[in-house]
């Protein structure tokens, strides 16, 4: 996450491929955890405005044989743009326009005043591990910033 934060701050051209690689790693780990009863329900957490890890892993698995350019097209069309349109439409209050992008005859049109600059939210896993360590459920080695089962 530190590397992603650095690249986001510097607006590095490597950011998108690095984030995509990270998402592929998340899918792989989710597939490994899906048969464990302790993690199965957690992997399915999501809603209309959030893609669950289980859904993402299934999507990557189902689309594994298509070319990268087609994968990226499907990713943008089915998981990013359509989700943006659905959430923006649901949040529309009759006054404030929530759409940042619209589909016009010439293609996508940017509607916002300024581009959205994403920020990295606090790492929930790191917070959870730290709390578990504080409660004595797991051990930690602060010098190496690692956690282990006790």
Image (cartoon, helix red, strand yellow):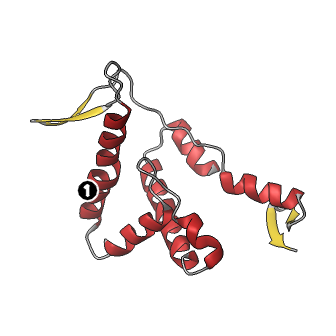
Q: Is residue 51 left or right of residue 108?
A: right
The residue at the point 85 percent across, 61 percent down is 133
In this view, which residue lies farthest toward the bottom? 35
**Place of residue 97 in the rendered image (x, y in percent of width and height, measured from the top left):** 32, 24
Q: Secondary structure at mark 1?
A: helix
**Place of residue 38 in the rendered image (x, y in percent of width and height, measured from the top left):** 65, 74
Q: Count of labels shown?
A: 1
Q: Quadrant of the rendered structure where residue 129 is? A: bottom right
**Place of residue 39 in the rendered image (x, y in percent of width and height, measured from the top left):** 62, 71
Question: Can residue 90 be seen in the rendering of this structure?
Answer: yes
The residue at the point 61 percent across, 79 percent down is 36
In this view, which residue lies farthest toward the left? 105
The residue beneath circle 1 is 73
Crowding at dot 1, Cα within 10 Å, few <14 / some 14-19 / many 20+, comes out as: few
Q: Quadrant of the rendered structure where residue 5 is? A: top right
**Place of residue 144 in the rendered image (x, y in percent of width and height, measured from the top left):** 83, 62
The residue at the point 54 percent across, 76 percent down is 34
The residue at the point 44 percent across, 69 percent down is 57
């Amino acid at each position: 996450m530190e590397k992603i934060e650095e690249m986001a701050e510097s607006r590095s051209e490597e950011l998108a491929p690095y984030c995509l690689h990270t998402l592929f790693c998340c899918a792989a780990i989710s597939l490994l955890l899906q048969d464990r009863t302790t993690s199965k329900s957690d992997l399915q957490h999501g809603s209309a405005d959030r893609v669950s890890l289980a859904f993402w892993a299934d999507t990557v698995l189902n689309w594994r044989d298509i070319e990268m350019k087609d994968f990226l097209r499907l990713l943008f069309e089915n998981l990013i743009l359509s989700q943006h349109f659905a959430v923006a439409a649901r949040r529309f209050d009759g006054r404030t326009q929530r759409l940042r992008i619209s589909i016009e005859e010439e293609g996508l049109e940017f509607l916002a005043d300024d581009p959205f600059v994403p920020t990295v939210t606090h790492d929930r896993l790191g917070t959870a591990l730290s709390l578990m360590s504080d409660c004595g459920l797991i051990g930690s080695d602060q010098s190496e910033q690692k956690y282990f089962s006790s």
